[in-house]
Image (tube, coloured by chain):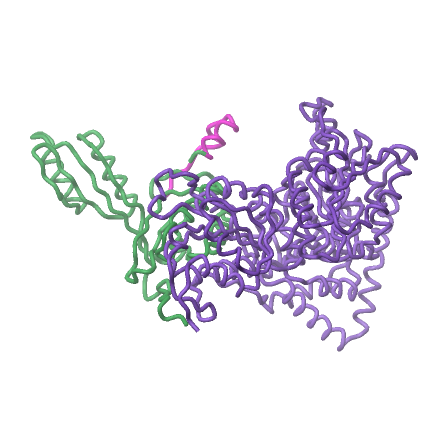
Amino acid sequence: MAERLKGTRILLESLKKEGVDTIFGLPGGAVIEIYDELFDMDFHHILVRHEQAAAHAADGYARASGKVGVVLVTSGPGATNTVTGIASAYMDSVPIVVFTGQVPTYLIGNDAFQEVDMVGITRPITKHNFLVKDVNDLARIVKEAFYIARTGRPGPVVVDLPKDVLAEWAEFDYDRVEMKLPGYKPNVKGHIGQIKKAVNKIFEARRPVLYIGGGVISSNASEEIRELARLLHIPVTSTLMALGAYPGDDPLFLGMLGMHGTFRANMAVTESDLLIAVGARFDDRVTGDVNQFAPQAEIIHIDIDPASISKNVQVDIPIVGDVKIVVRDMLKIIKDIIQKKPEKLEQYHKDLEPWHESIERWKETYPLAYRRDGKTVKPQFVIETLYKITKGENIIITTEVGQNQMWAAQYFLAKYPRTFITSGGLGAMGYGFPAAIGAQVARPDATVVDIAGDGSIQMNIQELATAVQYHLPVKIFILNNKFLGMVRQWQELFYDRKYSYTCEEVQPDFVKLAEAYGAKGFIVDREEMVEPVILEVLQERDKPVVVEFLIEREENVFPMVPAGGALNKMLLV
Amino acid sequence: MAKSIEKRKKSGTEDAWWPRPVRGGECVEAGEERHIISVLVLNEFGVLTRVAGLFSGRGYNIESLSVAETANPEISRMTIVTTGEAAVIEQIIKHLRKLIPVLKVVDVTDKPHVERELLLLKVRATEENKNEIFRLVDIFRARIIDVSPNSYVIELTGDPDKLNVFIDLFRNMGLLEVARTGIVSLQRGRVTLKEYDPKKEV
């Protein structure tokens, strides 16, 4: 039933129809009327303290829940502050819709107060964006924005809302609104001939590796990947983005590959004769030198985005489609083959035995390792202890960016999809804490821990107020080495130990800072304190907790493939 | 072309870089190909920026780009001439297809097609060169479309090569100004880019 509503109301009613119940935002002049309407409606609005955090929080919310994250901010600076968050969501293909206020249409182009060309600014970092020029288009644009954000290769969509357009009235009947997207038809079903070809290749392979990426999580295909790997005994390596998509403690799991990947994962990729890339995009941090990446392997690449295929590495069998649907079809074909010839599976398992032996040897030669002296707090020990205590159950890890992120990726063996949340593509410091807030809002039952560094945590530390206000018991583990650690590591290894401006000599007292915000603070400076403090902190259910671990200052992340190097040429200690 | 200049500086030897001329008179680096891509887009606000921004943001070359409404006013047709290695051209096409307002992308380069460009050329007209101008206009089947006391504007259509030659002939004859449209192109025969009518879609 059509009814006549004001634009602000149309916007919010459309959100309701899209199933939105949570909005991350911060009001301002251009959106004051939307907020006026919001006051009387039943939304869970999280008031952030900086708009960048709204975008990261919506991103964390989307990743933890599988739903579309929603941001509402004002024009000008409110809008530009979201840019880093939008860019991060774009690089990591996270579905968020960002509503930005805009000056009235008659002032656009006049350099009006708090005016900025948000559609122009965000064009290269959004999947698509809209400027609403007519209230009669509003509902359709909202519908299109959500549809574009969540389908195909997901991504952020910006909707710019001029103040006068939302003050006008129009007919509203969301269910009957038709989208006008003739040029947008994501291809979800893979070409069956290609899938058959891929299956044949898999059965011919003797050293296959499954290389899974964030697409496995976006398309909720973890179960299918597990089934495929376990049925055929194919070892699995994961990108940073896919951690948790395959259980980290599974015997077939090789760990992460790439610059800080495990020795066995990088060796396995280098020696493999068939690489099955699933929802991954051959990022430079994964491949190192592309000419020496998987040099002996034929490559099958399953991806929803045709532009990802053969972008960095030439692919032999491309399959464009939704990972879940393609892998299901693949499994069906494989099972048919096995049903007809059960001995084929047995034979295949036998054929792969030497391959598993090699992998086992690599694992024994150089397992992930670090030295402990019993006193100094080692960052790896902190993560390992957290994992040991929680076993990866009912916990979501978010990370900042840098060494903290890599140690978390290496030592926290995430078990379930949507439980390891990190800014992978953009590598935005300041991501982890607001993302943890978003994840905690999405999963109030779960323990949410942000693994942070002393540098990155200060980029969105103001959100402690948000977490306190909404009783979000996010745990922040600051691995404090008083350095911008990853840059320092590069300076140590490749720039002759010239620590050019990476030393953070002045820092706040993080415990007092937490307390000043009304949160709890702990400091840990000896190894023996690590476990008891973590145990205590995990009990907190009401407030955010900051734990400052004073770690070994010059600890490095190893293994390491120097940028642009071959994957099998790793620095190990 | 900025990319090529950078490459020349890096390699140090001009020979290694030296571009080979191709049809159209533009310079193309070794290994690179010139492609004509026809694109149908929704005729909406900002669509040109999206396409142009894709090229600049990802470092692709645009040699020429022409755009105007089709017979269906809701749809515009772009003809983009670009250069790049085969893999780059493939990426360009894939990325164009990813843009939401883009309906259809076809690389017509290797398909039978016609291509045309329009040139307007202004030349100083004097007693001495008038006859020569008339002669060239006649030979090239061009037309003089504006006559002023001491200048003419000449209109010429053809493939870019013909236009280049024509311009060159006027360089020492009082050439004042040139405006070109960039290429437009259609495939030969019955083949069309399937025109999409959004009104028909339910």
Residue B125 quadrant: top left
Report the predominant secondary structure element of the magenta stretch: helix
Q: Residue furthest bottom?
A: A340
Q: Which chain is green?
A: B
Is A43 drawn above or below residue A295 in the view shown?
Answer: below
Q: Position of residue A7 (x, y in %)?
A: 42, 58
Question: Can residue B81 be seen in the rendering of this structure?
Answer: no
From this view, report whether residue A351 is shown above or below residue A391.
below
**Does B1 sit left or right of A205 as displayed?**
left
Of residues A184 and A318, the one nearer the viewer is A184
In the shown orientation, is residue B39 left or right of residue A81? left
Q: Is residue B132 left or right of residue B27?
A: left
Q: Quadrant of the C terminus of chain A?
A: top right
Chain A's colour is: purple
B17 displayed left or right of A457: left
Which residue does the image show at 69% across and 66% down from the upper left?
Answer: A200
Q: Measured from the top left, where is residue A230 in percent x and y? A: 79, 64
Indicate whether residue A443 is drawn in magenta: no
Residue A366 location, x and y as percent? Answer: 85, 42
Q: What residue span does the magenta drawing correspond to?
A: B3-23
Q: Is B4 one of the magenta-colored residues? A: yes
